[in-house]
Amino acid sequence: MIKTERYSRFTLQPAVDGERHVEVRLSDDATDDATDAEGQDGGSPSFRPAPPHQPRRNICYLVLGTLLIFVIGYLVGYISHRKPRVELVNCSKELDTETATGAATGTATAVVKPAPAVQLAWKDITNLLTQKLTSQAFDQTLRDFDLPKRSAGSEEDMKLANLMFDEFKTLEMDPWTDIHYIQLQTPDSERPNRILFGSDDFKPTGYLAYSATGEVQGKLVYGNYGRQEDLDVLQKNSIELKGSVLLLRAGSISFAEQVDNVATKGASAVLIYPDVKDYDYVSDTALYGHVHLGSGDPYTPGFPSFNHTQFPPTRSSGLPKIPAQTITAKMATALLHGGFLGGLKSVTYRLGGSENITVEVNNVLVNREIHNVFGVIKGFTDPDRYVVLGAQRDAWDRGYAKAAVGTSVLVQLARAVHEMVENDGFRPRRSLVFASWSAGEYGSVGATEWLEGYMSSIDKRVVTYISLDGMVMGHGSFMASASPLLHRLLERTMKAVRTTTTTHLMLTQLCTHQLRPMSMDDPAYPFLAFSGIPSISFHFISPNSETYAYYGTSLDNKDHLNYQTNHRTSEVTAVAAQFAGQMALRLIHDHVLNLDVGRYTREINQNMFVACSSFQRAASGIIRDIDNTDLNDKEACRLLNDRIMTVEHSLLSPYVSPLETPFRHLLLGRGSHTLASITKTTDMGQLHTQVALATWTLQGCANAMVGNIWDIDDEI
């Protein structure tokens, strides 16, 4: 073990203006007495007075003195730059780290893990990952994370956060915690929510967070799923919606979208129940969810909920203005008089609109501290570029499929990749960040607050976000939502998992119908539509299903998931982990990012053919440069990857406010600026303006993809 004699000296010198300037020197012990003459009296060199006339004798002394100083300086330099003596330190605990050569020569050599002369082949990497992600390993991890309660900001949530932190610390992943102080809405224990209908007085235990509060009364109207087409049917049948209370079936669209749709029609309140045709469970099962048409803390829209931040009081534009409440199927049986076919027996479904009902919502706001926990396995070439794997750990109740499975996969992937780096010679080019989010059930609050807190740097560094939430809902089928940039990688990964897995699970071939648009309540949606990060979420699910019926209930437990997977939950989870792991490893291993920049051309062509030309030329330019680039040239690959990474973020419209329109993505966002909305605009003045703004957003994206300013093609 060597006692180093080389160090850094930091000097803080106060200047006239009161600022301190930092001077950093690297020096050896023999030379650290050297000082600076800077700052001495004498004024500026340009205005220093001329020296007085010196006699010749003084000149001779000056020459001799100069020679003497030169000789002394040479000797000092020789002495100070000789190889220093090494003082051996006797540390018996570290003797095993010294090499035989070091011991023989009397010197100690620090052990540094050498980079392999040849990078592991991709086939070897996938084989290693498959060997480590076994169903036996998940048997234990799933048991560890199966807890009876895990609500956001609770004591159980904090214990889980500490458990994740300790796990990352054990794996030497330099863990850190991101703390936020948020507002959540919960039922008032002293004043429960109530539904009054005739002689019935219902007090449901389930609720919808972020509902408007108060007591309203109106005619009860049945509105099916509350989709736009459902409400149009009601209006065509001359059913008055203004001031009415709509009774809706859960499903098809999110709670927030249901409430927003009926609110725009003038309804006074919303009741939502699980119809047995869609949710085959006991009729008194309580239902939980949220109705914020957005993500993150709705009382700090666009900025993070850090402690002591002084922002003016504000509300998200996505907060509903009418009360909303869930009820059980049993309660709905007593209320239902609607007009669409459901599954409740002994009930005649009519449109309603004749009987009054009273809805009272008394939810209260509470302050909660939440912790996002991170760990990182750093890359060896571009450590400042990273892929993020994330999973929420909170849930309304047990949350076995919603939270326990994703958290288990996060931990097992961290262990597997750590072992591959430490023991198997894997050297990722980019970093892999593991994130455990809190308050996901309230609308991806923890994840969105992180995005808001580091908005200026995250989009320039994060390559892709891969969501692990809800990745196992059953078995026998597969469905995914992703940025078009990731579609090709998604297809390749599915084929690879089909060939590398040793199980007999039916992994259907990826087809177009299995790729669906990413919905607003998807945990990956804020990363894609708010921050412009290529993102993906995927689900192994039972055939003919689009969702997991037990989400938001106390029935999201191990037994029900085992039933959906035919008692092969660990086996399906291992395959899902391999799928997520292979995608992540491909993105941190390859020289050039595996993002298909040409895929967006097809999406844009369908909406704005004229504006697509610049984008198409820029995308073709990147593809051409990839073909002509030496992939062993690290700097060239980094420049190419930087251009690829600009695509998604550059599709965020700069012409709308993130406070009013947080999901600014031109193709996948939500608002009047999106291409889908523009195609439906009938106002010609507004149409011309929106087309111009969308066109220039696309041109800006094309310019960013080109890279060099002198290569920009400004032809539109």
Image (tube, helix red, strand yellow):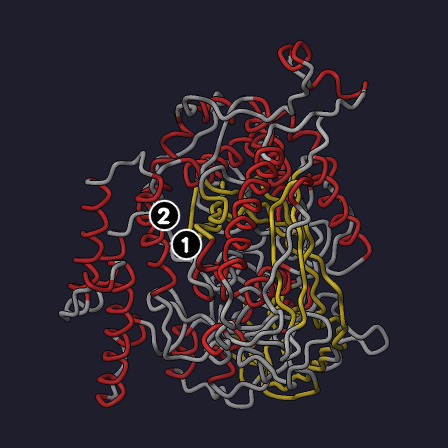
- x 64%, y 74%: residue: 15
Type of amino acid at the residue the image marks with label 1? Pro
Q: Residues within 10 Å of mark 2 (few under 14, many from 20)?
A: many
Residue 653 horizontal side relative to residue 259, left or right: left
Vertical placement of 69 versus 45: above or below?
A: above
Q: Answer yes or no: is residue 64 visible.
A: yes
**Left or right placement of residue 283 versus residue 242 in this view:** right
Q: x%, y% of residue 78?
A: 57, 33
Q: Number of labelled discs?
A: 2
Say which mark, if any, is on residue 111. Answer: none
Q: Viewer-proximal residue, 715 or 550?
A: 715
Give the residue number, with chain letter if any, for mark 2: 486
Which one is nearer the viewer's eye here, 184 or 335? 184
Q: Amino acid at mark 2?
A: Leu
Q: Secondary structure at mark 1?
A: loop
Q: Which residue is mark 1?
A: 534
Q: Considering depth in this image, is 484 or 220 the residue closer to the camera?
A: 484
**Of the pair 314 and 258, the residue shown nearer to us:** 314
Q: Are marks 1 and 2 in contact (CB under 8 Å)?
A: yes
Residue at left 51%, top 31%?
Answer: 575
